[in-house]
Amino acid sequence: MNDEKYFLYSLINNYLDFSENIKGLSKNTTNSYQRDLNKFSKFLEVSGVNDFENLTEEVCSAWIADLFQHNISARSIQRHISSAKGFFNYLKKSGLVTEDSPFELINSPKSPSYLPNILSPEEVSQLLNFKPKNAQEKRDLAIIELIYSSGLRVSEAVNTNLKDFEDNKNFLRVLGKGSKTRLVPVGRYAQSAINDWMIEREKLATKDDALFINLRGSRITTRSVQERLKNIAIVQGLPPVNPHMLRHSFATHLLESSGDLRSIQELLGHSSLSTTQIYTRLDYQHLIKVYENSHPRAHKKNV
């Protein structure tokens, strides 16, 4: 399909430009919008829909059914519908179309209840107990310590620059989703690991301001962090671990010890408290386990 000749092409580009440059959404978010809307656009062309008059609620429902037939998960379909609704709302508010959104009455499918995987404090200790043997491993330990210490997303960790530290590395200024910045504390173990890595980093030829670089002097990639963390976890006798598990573990362990959901929201960089509230469910599960293992009347006796 030649997207440039299709009737939605320029409108989608206008929406993406508006989302990134006016609303300040991240490149990752707008790229996601673009993928979803391109799928929708291609479906319309295959279906012979080439104007807004024929773009009906029935056509949109058929697109959602097509996504299901291609084994797209309910959570992913929710995102596709959200992208489309945002696009049509933009068109209406901008006066680019007069028709109501064909997605207006379409509800998103319910996704199964989801709770993030976390590590226990003992498993975190087991993971972080590995002894670096070279510069790469010292860097890896510093990354892992920083993500768990400060609750960073892996993208935030790899995008950290040397100038982002404040107060002698006690705090880190993080650029998060939606180009929003937040100040997070850095624990002493993370500081120590970062200082050890900095000694090795100074030996590498680089002009990059990135805190974490590879042996060629370039900023390390998120993919590289994911692979190296997985391998370190296996070497340490754990199942494969990904960076987001460390972020989830950070939030859950803080909640278990403090109960301060609002502060955890700020540290994680969540725009909505409802996003952070998933950790209350994890904490509730923890309390249930403690009750079942400790309370003398928690278990039914076998008769």
Image (spheres, helix red, strand yellow):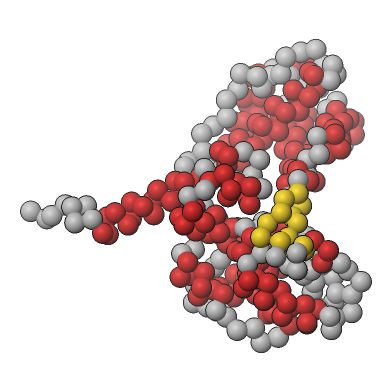
Q: Position of residue 26 (x, y in %)?
A: 78, 44
Which residue lies at the image location 54% right of the left edge and 68% below the top edge? 240
- Residue 214 sits above or below residue 303 on the image: below
* Residue 183 or residue 127, whichever sits in front: 183
* In the image, farthest residue toward the left: 303
Looking at the image, can residue 113 be seen?
A: yes
- Residue drawn at point x = 56 percent, y = 75 percent: 128
Q: Is residue 166 above or below residue 182?
A: below
Task: Assign the N terminus to one quadrant of the image.
Answer: top right
Q: Which is more toward the observer, 168 or 225?
A: 168
Quarter of the view holding residue 209: bottom right
Pinpoint residue 220: horizontal percent, then vertical percent.
77, 68
Give x and y (percent) for residue 198: 77, 77
Q: Residue furthest front?
A: 167
Which residue of the protein is positioned furthest toward the bottom in this rendering? 133
* Vertical order, 27 against 110 (above or below): below
Q: Is residue 227 visible?
A: no
**Residue 118 percent coordinates (x, y):** 50, 59
> Which residue occupies 58% across, 50% down?
264
Q: Is residue 123 left or right of residue 22?
A: left
- Describe residue 267's horizontal placement relative to residue 1 as left or right: left
Residue at (64%, 44%) from the top-left corner? 270
